[in-house]
Amino acid sequence: MNDVIVVEDLRRDYISTVGILKKSKKRVEALKGLSFSVKSGEVFGLLGPNGAGKTTTIKILTTLLIPTSGNAMVLGHKTFGEERLLRPKINFIFGGERSLYWRLSALDNLKYFSDLYQIEPKVQRERIPMLLKMVGLEERQHHKVETFSKGMKQRLQIARGLINDPEILFLDEPTIGLDPSGAIELRNIVKKLSNEGKTILLTTHYMQEADEMCDRIGIIAKGQLVGLGTPKALKASCGKDTLEEVYLDLVGAQYES
């Protein structure tokens, strides 16, 4: 399988104001030379504590943030400098419900995002019903999103993220805040997409979820990669029975040093 995401020595700094009066400034290193790759058709998990650099990495890979230095290539395109070539081929979903219009129906949301991607009406008429059926919302397609449960909104976000038939789907904590049944439904959708050949990069705080869904996992702490491999290989290399134990060992060692 070919590498469809290649990250080499990726760095991202930003200036943070500190102190009660916010007059002092300090440079914060969100990413400190991060390197990894993702193969076509893989479900790749990016794990790490809050502030480790997961969301920063996804924002760079989806052309939403400029790296300070290093290289980030997605589908053979630079994420900074070749955004127009890359954006039609990818899509992303961040945890929460902010990328939907609540006063519109599920159907109208998907039509709106289809128009943004300049998808032809004929394709829309075929793709939108298929996506609504896939996420189990075909019977609620004419209902306003503000009447949906959190799980329904997140399933609609999956449909929204697939509206342009992306080659790579980025998911940033997609099951955050969902009840167990909603999380299971969402994981089943992700598995289905993977079986259909979609490449998926996701972040999550749920170790069992990562162990169940991911072909390979990268663990980051303080903006650096501290572990990389299949869940089975990571557990074997650390002599642990669970991914949670591996995570605590690798991340804990970084923060103790």
Image (cartoon, rainbow, N blue to C red):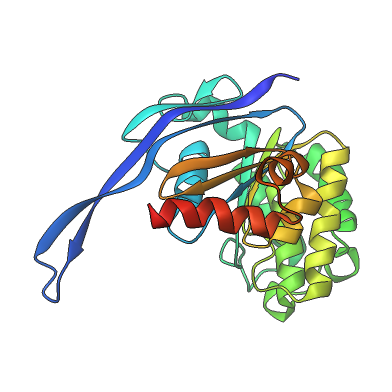
In this view of the protein, which residue sits in the foreground, 48 or 122?
Answer: 48
Q: Nearer the viewer, residue 82 or 33?
A: 33
**Which residue is drawn at the image coordinates 61% and 68% (left, top)?**
97
Horizontal arrangement in the rendering, residue 55 relative to residue 247 (left or right): left
87 on left or right of 164: left
User: Looking at the image, can residue 189 be seen?
Assistant: yes
As drawn, 89 above or below 217: above
Q: Position of residue 164 (x, y in %)?
A: 70, 40
Spot occupied by residue 169 in the image (x, y as percentages of width and height)? 68, 42
Q: Residue at x 61, y 33 (%)?
A: 88
Give the side of residue 96 with respect to residue 164, left or right: left
Q: Is residue 64 visible?
A: no
For residue 163, what is the image quadrant?
Answer: top right
Residue farthest front in this picture: 239
Residue furthest to the bottom: 147
Q: Residue at the spot x=87%, y=37% of the render?
A: 196
Would you place residue 126 above or below residue 7 in this image? below
Is residue 227 rendered to the left or right of residue 106?
A: left
Number of numbered labels in the structure image: 0
Check the picture and name the quadrant holding the N terminus: top right
Residue 178's image quarter?
bottom right
Q: Residue at x 75, y 60 (%)?
A: 208
Counting from the top left corner in percent of width and height, residue 111 is at 71, 53
Query: Which quadrant of the figure has residue 74?
Result: top right
